[in-house]
Image (spheres, rainbow, N blue to C red):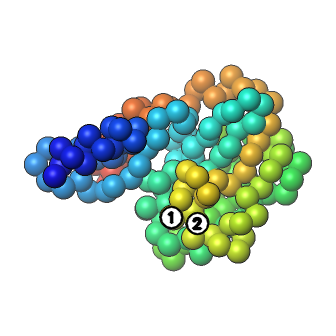
Amino acid sequence: MRMWASSTANALKISCASKAPFALPRCFSTVLDGLKYAPSHEWVKHEGSVATVGITDHAQDHLGEVVFVELPELGVSVSKGSSFGAVESVKATSDINSPVSGEVVEVNSKLTESPGIINSSPYEEGWMIKVKPSTPTELDTLMGSKEYTKFCEEQDASH
């Protein structure tokens, strides 16, 4: 069964943030290839002149059920590493940091009415903002999927 899950995950280009050799993985967090990841657990997908930003599956899993999302207004400038909003869950409230500097060109208004989309679809429907990067080279400092998976494993092991 584990081999089937592993080959299916490979085909879908996902990985689990835990690779315990003789036990079931502690978590089933999905990490997608092709995205960049910040140490504060935000992801970014850069396409053309726009970068789409959201929180990772790992982050939403640790937060629990998301009940409220605070997002910025259109046209606001965001800075790499600075808060642009917040996510409130049944467990805690957490700031959301921008992985890239730039201007907010789109906000996912669906999250206002249905914040739980972040739990069910953090990489697809649960995106938060779209940014026109002012310094696209900032994306080069973010982690790829393998580095982020290792980062999550190390972070979870230390807790």
Tell me the quadrant of the picture where the C terminus can be found.
bottom left
Other residues around mark 2 within 10 Å, as few (<14) / some (14–19) / many (≥20):
many
Numbered mark located on residue 111 in the image: none
Residue 138 visible here? yes
Which residue is under mark 1? 120
Residue 130 x, y percent position in the rendering: 74, 46
User: Which structural element holds mark 2?
Assistant: helix
Residue 81, image x, y percentages: 66, 41
Q: Amino acid at mark 2?
A: Ile
Q: Point out the residue furthest to the left here.
A: 22
Residue at 65% x, 72% y is: 114
Q: Position of residue 51 (x, y in %)?
A: 70, 38
Q: Going by the image, does 105 lie left or right of 89?
A: right
Using the image as rendered, state which of residue 30 and residue 85 is in the foreground.
30
Question: Within 10 Å of the Cα at label 1, are there few (<14), some (14-19), or many (20+) other Cα atoms?
Answer: some
Most foreground residue, 128 or 154? 128
Q: Is residue 153 visible?
A: no
Q: Is residue 92 above or below residue 52?
A: below
Q: Nearer the viewer, residue 55 or 91?
A: 55
Q: Quadrant of residue 111?
A: bottom right
Residue at 67% over, 27% down: 138
